[in-house]
Amino acid sequence: MSNQILFEDAYIERCNKETEELIAKEPDSFLNQPLEHLKKHKNEFLYLESKHFEGIHVDAVSLEVDDVFGTYDVMLGLKLQKKFGSALKEELNQTLSGNEARFDLLFSNEDGLWDLNFALNYVEGFKEEFSIREAFVLIYQFLAKLVERVK
C-alpha cells in the first residue's frame, strides 16, 4: 500500500498536552508538515485514528515531544491478550535501539489493553527530517511487525 494513501482517511487532532483540550481538527494534508512541528509546539500532541490501525490491533496513536528527553514519544493501546506480555517485552527490547528507557508497557485490566509508550527515535529507520506522515508510516510499520512477531 502506498504511504501516501495510508492515512488519507485519518482523523487527526492537535491537542494541548496539559489539558488534553482540542486545539484543532486537521485534514490529512496536515501530515505533510515537518515532524519538527511538534518540537516547535511542545505543548501539543497529535492524536490520529485510522482504519488501517485496526488490522494491527490499535485504535489510535498519539505522538508528542518528551519535555525532558526531547524524543518523539508514541502512545497507544494495543489490543492483545495479557498472555502476550513477555513476548511483547522481549520483542520491544530487541527492536528498539538506544541506551535510555526505550519503552513503557503496562497491561490495563480495566481496558483489556496494553498501554504502550515508546520513543520513535529508537525505531530503526527514524529520521528527524521526516514529515509527520512519514513518522506515522514508520509507527504503523513498526507496530505491524511487532504484532506479527508476537502472535
Image (cartoon, rainbow, N blue to C red):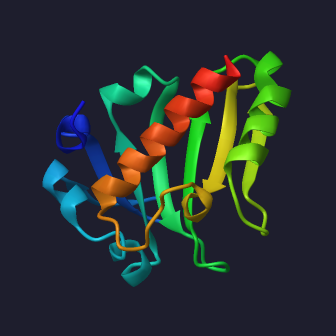
Position of residue 20 relative to residue 93, above or below, is below
Image coords of residue 151 (percent x, y): 67, 16
Tell me which corner region of the image, top left, top right, bottom left or bottom right, holds residue 85: top right
Q: Residue at x 66, y 78 (%)?
A: 69
The quarter of the image holding the N terminus is: top left
Hey, which residue is sitting farthest right in the picture? 86
Q: Residue at x 43, y 48 (%)?
A: 138
Image coords of residue 150 (percent x, y): 69, 23
Q: Residue at x 78, y 47 (%)?
A: 93
Left or right, 66 with reference to 52: right
Left or right, 51 with reference to 82: left
Tell me which corner region of the image, top left, top right, bottom left or bottom right, holds residue 51: top left
Image coords of residue 11 (percent x, y): 27, 41
Comparing 97 with 15, the one in front is: 97
Number of numbered discs visible in the structure rendering: 0
Comparing 103 with 109, the one in front is: 103
Q: Is residue 47 visible in this depiction of the protein? A: no
Comparing 114 with 6, the one in front is: 6
Q: Is residue 29 visible in this depiction of the protein? A: yes
Left or right, 6 with reference to 21: left
